[in-house]
Image (tube, helix red, strand yellow):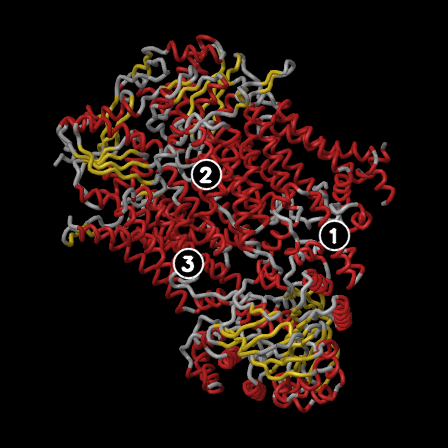
Amino acid sequence: MTEMFLTLEGVTAAYSNMEALRRVNVQVEKGKIACLLGSNGAGKSTLIKAILGLVKVVEGRITFDGEDITREKTHRVVRRGISIVPEGKRIFPKMTTIENLRMGAYIEQDEQAIEERLERVFELFPRLEERAHQIAGTMSGGEQSMLSIGRGLMSSPRLMIFDEPSLGLAPILVEQNFETIQRINEEGTTVFLVEQNASLTLEIASYGYVLQKGKVVAEGTAEQLTDSEVIQSAYLKS
Amino acid sequence: MDDQQRTLAGPWGIIILLGVELIIYVLFLALLLVPGGEILAAEALLLVAAVFYFRRNPALGARIQQLFAAHARIAWIGAVVLVLLIPFFIASSPYWLFTIIIAGLFLTACLGLNLQLGSSGMVNLASAAFYAVGAYAAGLLALGWGWPAWITLPAGAVMAGLFSALLFVPVLKTKGHYLALVTIAFQFMVTILLDNMEWTGGPQGLKNIPLFSVAGYSFNTAINLGFIKLPAYANFFYLMVLVVAVVGVASQRIYSSWVGVTLSTIRDDEIAAQTFGVQVNRWKLVIFSLGNCFIGLAGAFYSHLVGFISPPNFAFDKSLVMVSIVILGGMDNVFGVIVGSLLLIILPEKLRVVQDYRFLIYGLVLIIMLIFRPRGLVPFKARDFLDLAGPVRRKRAASASSTVSEGGA
Amino acid sequence: MRNRFSLLWKRSHKGLVLTLCLLLVLGLVAAQCAPGAGKKETVKISFIGPLTGGNAGPGLGGRNSFLLAVKERNEDPDTKYNYEVVQIDDECKPDVGVQAALKASSDPDVVAGASHYCSMVAISTADTFHNQGMPSMVWGAVLPDITYGNDYVEITRVNGTQINQNEVHAKMMYDMGYRTVSILHDTTDYGRGHLKYFSESWEALGGQILSVQGVNVDQQDYTAELTKIKAENPDFIYFGGLTPSGIPIRKQMVKLGIEAQFNGTSGIKNESFNEALGPDAEGVICFLEGAPIDELPGGKAFLEKYEAEGYEEPPEAYGPFAYVAGHLIIDAIEKVGPDRAKVAEELEKNTKDRDTIIGKVSFDDHGQNIVPLITAYVSQDGKWVSWNKSEYAGGQRQLVPPK
Amino acid sequence: MTFLDILLQQSINGLMLGIMYSLVAVGFTLYFGVLDVINFAHGDFFMLGGFMALMLYAIAEAVGFAGNALVVVIYLFIGSMILTGVVGVVTERVCVKPVSKAPMLISLLVTLGLGIAIREAVRVLYPRGSDPKGFPTLMPQGSFNVGNIVIRYENLIIFGLGIAVIMAVNFLINRTKMGAAIRAVAQDGEAAMMMGVDLDRTIDITFLIGSAVAAVAGIMNGFYYGQTMFNIGAMMGVIGFSAAVIGGLGNIYGAIVGGILFGLLETFAAAALPYGAENKRVFAFLIVILFLVFRPTGILGEKIFERV
Amino acid sequence: MDNSRVFWTEDLSIAFGGLLAVDRVNLDISRGEILGLIGPNGSGKTTIFNLVTGIYTPSTGDFFFEGESLLGKPAYQIARKGIARTFQISRLCLDLSVLDNVFIGMHYRQKYWLVDAVFRRRLLAREVSQARDRAFSLLGVFNEELVDLAGKPVGTLPQIDRRRVEICRAMAMEPKLLLLDEPSAGMTPEEMTELMQDIKKVQEESEGISIIIVEHDMTVIRSISDRVVALNYGRKIAEGTFEEVSDNAEVREAYLGKRGHRL
């Protein structure tokens, strides 16, 4: 019996009349990397916002670690141990690198722990240590992406959600990011990876869902999905 | 439905329609003529009850709207007749007649402001300054050169339009909060300068501005019709109705024309408008000036109504009242501006019964109304061109539109 | 017909419609059921003044004094009528004033009234009262034009004008040896009026004006203007304006260490000035029309009665004038009956040498009270003391001497 | 007095005025950051702060609490800051936040209405609220001379206090965790929530700080000018907003620069221009308009790209 | 000069704060052609649209329409030359009716001015009548039902209809070059197919119109475009038929990551 960490049951949600989710069922297994694939506008971001309580969930239920978190306020959801690396990095542009990272550990009170985590992030991204006192908005896209991931790690989360970590990055950087994600997972954090880039994602993920126009159109293990026609026809190529 | 429609189209429909108009009219007159604050409370209660009622029964409201749409002409005639009869019913109270004239002036000015604020999205918190320009232009021309009011009235409007040029650059270069601040700053500059300049009479303003008179008939004479004696303000009232009619029809026609569509697009999305060939800057300047013309016209009228103007008449709080009228009434909506100006000019007068607490209540009412009806009392509705284009699509029009058409071809 | 109407008014609507009608009727009835009249015939008189806004202080003081006068007369068994006061706020704004004047005069029951503290408002409503034929007695506004700018029989004024005040002011200072003055005035009609009449009087005497600076009423900081004055080193500073500006000017003058006498006009003659400034008010001079109230018979009684009524606000400088206006108006009505034209005639023509708490009152043919007396006051130990009775006049204390 | 003396003296005057403008401008800047709202009632919080202090002083006198002046002053400042701050938070919750997502004009009008309500409430509820109210003299009244210039201890204290408050706010915003949350919300509210920041609480705190700082300015204003009045807030609001914009909206240093610049502008216009005293605001507002047109982001603001 | 070339850019570039969003891009399109513009998010497609419609001014480079340089011209003039566009995030005026939204596309053909608005109602009625018929026929190309919805505020319409209205608004300008920015965003596959047929129909009905379409959905691009240009990091990385471009290694890498060949 595998333990389901995060589950969405029949979740329907709407976001500014645009993207919508229709009765979505998704489960993330503890300690694994689950992924959610889908093209632009498929509703991936809405799904994440639904988990975080940023979008109104019309029906359905979201649970995390056995507890109902449907319609819970964002900061409470985060305090339960979910961390997010949002789409488009969403770093705080007028803060320095280190301030950004400290924001990531906002819910942590223990200064000692924060220092330790900072070191861990710097170990993971030596580049960030070099730029520790630079204003984040002036850094390159790749560095901002590292910062965003680093910031997500700072809360020492039990579940990390990545929203399109490949977006707008050079392929080499994308690969680096994915390697980092894999490493994070290996160190014990459950990962929910939401991506457009299917091939790389399926390489590191164990289980996946394909979202299209707000509905889950396919799911299965990474191998099943890689070979699946669904992905070929509905998502990537014609 | 068909049966109902046929009935509404018949004579019974007309009677019901006139009945509705009459009820509103009586409530309005009662508000003015019954002394004391109880009537205000009673009608406010009535209004709130009606709002809730219509919200729960939207069909009834829709049907009344259809009724008005079906008999637009009769509805208009009825309304005009009722308006023209107002002086007869309140002949005993020049005070209320005067207050209604003031409401009419604010209506004129706010129609101009509505062009800027409502139709094109340009914030103008300096409307009292342009009101002042119109008033002073009229007053100075009348006093200095002895121009008759018939010329100073449009001259005041034109001067206000010309003065708009002072703000042309800021209007194009700033938006939102920043434009608001520009116009506030301009407003303060104008009031301070009016106090300090010699040739505008300084703080003492202009005195003894001649009141209206036509061919020797002074508007300051009471009208004696034999069976009833109307106060002198009745003259001004009818002139005001004329001015409001001209400005109102012009506003409504601008709204229901290509120009209205263009302005709406500029308001909603300047960039999209540009990419469809709209000369956004030119339109903004034209409308800004035109709106100020209307405001200036109201100012000039005020000069000749009271015969005395001075800087405190044109302070920032007047701008606020005008903006409140437009926003509270409903932006880009001539009917909304009418409702807004009647409400916001008459309400403080009725609130006089609570004396000291008047402005506290006024402030609170403003906040509450804005929180609960941020789109105004009469919200903007999609323009309906289908009627204008003739009978071809009548059938379609009936099914596609639920709005009241006000632009008769 | 039921059928037709039922289209609009279904049965379910009926209850609501009925309730609404009932409510309306109730409202109307309630409105009409005003408290029943007493034995005497009721006559309405109006009081108009600033009851809200920045000038509400003196406005409310005037109102209370006026109410006191009316109360006295109503309690007097000899009066023929029962008087009811209609009080209206003019916010000290001309356009609101016109509406207020119209409201009062539109009511045919209102026979006469005391109106206006602010000059601008009084000027703007003169025409209105004239057109409506309602007698209006100005109780606080001081611009000469209010009475001298027209020939209306309806307009009278119980208080003096800026001209009287400034003549006396200039003369007194000149006689004491002051020669140079720096003038501050607010940019309202009130301040500019004082500037005009004081400059005329002062220059006629041969005094020298070092500088004239206008200030805005909503200003808090006057250090820039005062620093300039400090450099000019005048014998005294003249300020034409009201208390809200007067307090910070005096305060900042002290703080900047300007050694010069500070004189104000009637606009600062109120308790707030002394209360707010505390010891800094010491030695400030101002002028007010009329005799010092507590030196006249009846004046003390007025103050005591005012005190006894427990009004929240003090009567302020012009309260006694409003009080007198109330009495004069009622006197006229008692004499000629509640008829506007007769009352107006009576007030303007027959108010001669009347003894009041502000001294004798006589109207000239413009309806202006020719007050024989202007009183100088000096702030002494936190109170306005009339000059002649003060320790300054007695020599125990010293003003800031001329250079 | 020499020309230089006058210049120096006027500079002192301008700085004193400017420091109060700065304190009000800080509030505008904070609110605009976190809620994108221009709170035109802010000037009335400035006024309210002064009246709260007066009320607290009256209470202290009534119960016979009278330590030395320093204790009383501290009590007045802290008490008024708390009370005004609480009023600020309550009004934010009730009036400002519900309309912060509405079109800008609505929020503008609501805050203007709020300003009217606060002003009138003070006038009606405070005993004899329409009169100017004197402030107790609790500051040391001595002075010393540098050449011909008079420098008062009181001025030094108020100026020092103003600078200290601004530095404290700066410390709070830039050096504390709470401040980090406020800045994060200002830059990207949603991302801040994703970090676990409680958005509502952060906005509350911002209004608490903004109102409390305005209260400080209000009390300083009272001590410095010796009086306060219920209607001084409206003009202060407009000037505070102008100062915030001149400095660069959303930037705390900008608020200081803008406030002091506005104060100096007014002072020197009054002192140096012909008819300057009566027209100084005309001049100052003209500068505001020029700034808005030619450098809308203010002296210290950054350029913003409009995304299409 | 190739006469059939309607529009082309020369080394078009723009930088935002040091970042080259569009880097020396050369595009050209012939009369009647449909050009697909593809590339990952942030590769500069929309920015190119913003440049050639005059919303941004290029840092360097130039662009030509019918042989004439439009560099530095204000947006409304460029529009009047015959370039119309839609927006990625719909920029319709949601409070206005469908008809009003389409009318704005006809804005600059109307000779009607402020004075006419007040005094010449007959003229207006005539013009409205014509414009309405044109709008109806445009809306009718897509869907007869849209005609019935003409009086409704756009905000009440479903996503696909809004897209259609937006395209109608652009078509109402009778443009010679139409720029479509992700017309299918936020639609179901069925809706998308429908919309693509519509676009084809539009092109058939208006002879000779050229279309540049930015699209994420490869189905759309394949089915509709004559030629495809791929962008990455603001640079053009490939050009040719859909097959050529989609087989291009650099494109696959840009889209799918380095190991994209596995699929």
Residue at the spot x=60%, y=33% of the render?
A: B40
Q: Secondary structure at mark 1?
A: helix
Between tags 3 and 1, which lies in front? 1
Query: What label does residue D294 carry, if any?
Result: 3
Q: On the rendered image, what quadrant is the C terminus of chain C found in?
A: top left
Vertical side of D271 occupied by E167: above or below: below
Are labels 2 and 3 assigned to the same chain?
no
Front-most of residues C39 and B160: B160
Q: Is residue D137 visible?
A: no
Name the residue: 20% across, 29% down: C203
Question: Which residue bears the numbered disc 1?
Answer: E130
Residue E94 % position (x, y): 66, 57
Disc 3: CA contacts within 10 A as few (<14), some (14-19) or many (>=20): few
Q: Secondary structure at mark 2?
A: helix
Inter-mark Cα distance, 2 to 3? 26 Å
The residue to which callout 2 is attached is B133
- Judge from the rendering whether residue C385 lies leftward or rightward of residue B50; answer left or right: left
